[in-house]
Image: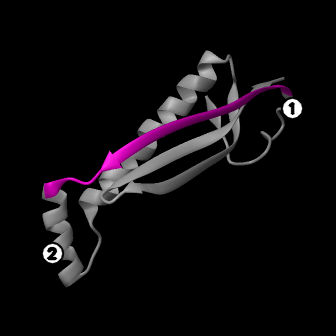
Amino acid sequence: MLCVTTPDVAHRPIKEVLGTVSGSVVQSKHVGRDIMAGFKSIFGGEIRGYTQMLVEAREEALHRAIAEAEHMGADAIVNMRFTTSTIMQGASEILVYGTAVRLS
């Protein structure tokens, strides 16, 4: 599946717009990661545990959006965007959305 953040795909005209697709993951913090985050907040530096957690959540959200687009018969997702929002203290949603299209 071709996924782009642009409104079209270079040299590939859009034949049909199939609709909006999305993928979402709600990720909560982990107690072990919180302990390390506490140390990092004192001494500074990247909190790698949280970085990896968010990378994995983005990948899963992307896979879910792609699965939805494939189910619709799409060749590509255009105008793809990633957003993050806080659901509650200690939990965030990673959302991927875009427009599923068939290319010529």
Q: Please tell me how crowded label 1 is: few (under 14), some (14-19), or many (20+) other residues with Cα within 10 Å.
A: few
Which numbered disc, 2 or 1, marks the residue that appears first in the sequence?
1
> How far apart are labels 2 and 1 at the CA level?
52 Å
**Going by the picture, which residue comes out furthest to the front?**
88
Q: Quadrant of residue 7?
A: top right
Residue sitting at x 58%, y 24%: 68
Which residue is label 2 attached to? 39
Q: Which disc is residue 13 wearing?
A: 1
Q: Nearer the viewer, residue 9 or 64?
A: 64
Q: Quadrant of residue 78?
A: top right
User: Where does the image place residue 53, in percent across and percent down from the top left?
Assistant: 31, 51
Secondary structure category for the residue under label 1: loop
Task: Classify 35 as above or below 15.
Answer: below
Provide the residue span drawn in magenta: 15-31
User: Where does the image place residue 2, in percent across and percent down from the top left?
Assistant: 64, 33
**In screen coordinates, is 93 left or right of 90?**
right
Residue sitting at x 86%, y 31%: 13
Residue sitting at x 61%, y 41%: 97
| Magenta-colored segment: predominant secondary structure | strand
Residue sitting at x 29%, y 70%: 46
